[in-house]
Amino acid sequence: MRVLDKVFVVTGAGSGIGRELSHCLLSRGAHVAGVDLDPTSVQTTGELASQHAGQFAAFAADVSQRAAVEALPEQVLAHFGRVDGIINNAGIIQPFRRLNDLEYSIIERVLNVNLFGTLFTIKAFLPHLLRRPEAHIANVSSMGGFVPVPGQTMYGAAKAALKLMTEGLAAELDGTKVRVSVVFPGAVATNIVANSGLDVRQLANRSSGSKAMPASAAAEIIVRGIERDAARIFVGKDAAFMDKLYRLSPSCAARAIASRMRALLPA
């Protein structure tokens, strides 16, 4: 689906990939409803794209709160008049700890943002997307959604569930005008890792042996994938390689990741 003149809802639009997705869509002539928990950061996303004034609107909402998400369609439709696509990008990782050391409050937050936040957004906007001549849903999973990462077990579980939910949704929508993509980023330089207390360069070097991809480059890959209606969008050579290795030998792929990631875990 060409994004030109389309209206997209982008969650997690206040920083990282979400901000760059917003700017990439705007530069291609789309309109963007940017959604983020932090109203200041999502406003800044719009201000940084001031050359596209009128194409961007900021909305503050916590995607883990069902009522807040269910209020969004009315707000977005009041501003833009329609919705043609959603990109469920909002996500958080867990602290790098073993499952045995994770508090339930952290586990619930990781599941609520990464899985239920995406579910709430889909359920809220899908009835409107089904009325459009063409529409698109893109859900951002993770390389950790198909290969286990020690210290990120619950994050991986949420992203794996999101992957299968996306694939099931795509099957259910076959025959409609709504296309569905699942996105698998590898190491991308965003604040999602910094917020866990780690240096993103350290994580990229230990997890993939390569530098983290800039968020702007990741956004370009995702938008190009949406425009060609790709069912699976791999962001980075590390994600594409690990997908192939995991399908060839799951145990080998798991060992390869574990050997790099265990050093990040507390003793």
Image (cartoon, helix red, strand yellow):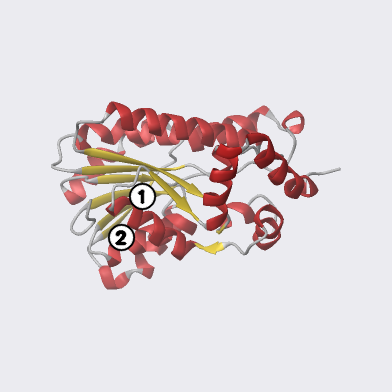
Q: Relative to 3, is 165 above or below?
A: above
What amino acid type should be assigned to the residue bearing mark 2? Leu
Answer left or right for 35 relative to 135.
right
Q: Locate residue 66, reporting x and y percent.
A: 40, 30
Crowding at mark 1 (Cα within 10 Å: few <14, some 14-19, many 20+): many
**Residue 58 pos. (x, y %):** 33, 54
In depth, the one of 31 and 267 nearer the eye is: 267
Q: Is residue 255 left or right of residue 119?
A: right
Tell me where residue 175 appears, x and y as whole percent. 20, 31
Nearer the observer, disc 1 or disc 2?
A: 2
Label 1–label 2 contact, CB within 8 A? yes
Q: Which residue is mark 2?
A: 25
Question: Residue placed at 33% from the left, 57% from the top?
Answer: 224
Confirm whether residue 149 shows in the render: no
Numbered disc 1: secondary structure: strand
Q: Nearer the viewer, residue 202 or 259?
A: 259
Query: In the rendering, at what x and y percent does residue 234 appear?
Result: 46, 50
Q: Disc 1 marks which residue?
A: 10
Q: Residue at x 24, y 56 (%)?
A: 3
N-term-proximal mark, 1 vs 2: 1
* Image side of residue 238 versus residue 153, left or right: left
Q: Nearer the viewer, residue 73 or 17?
A: 17
Q: CA distance from mark 1 to mark 2?
A: 10 Å
Residue at 37% across / 27% down in the picture?
168
Give residue 175's mark: none
Taking 49 as reference, is 84 above or below it? above
**Quarter of the image that includes the C terminus:** top right
Between residue 152 and residue 250, name the one nearer to us.
250
Tell me if mark 2 has few (under 14), some (14-19) or many (20+) residues whose alpha carbon lies within 10 angstroms of its own: many
Question: What amino acid does circle 1 point to?
Answer: Val
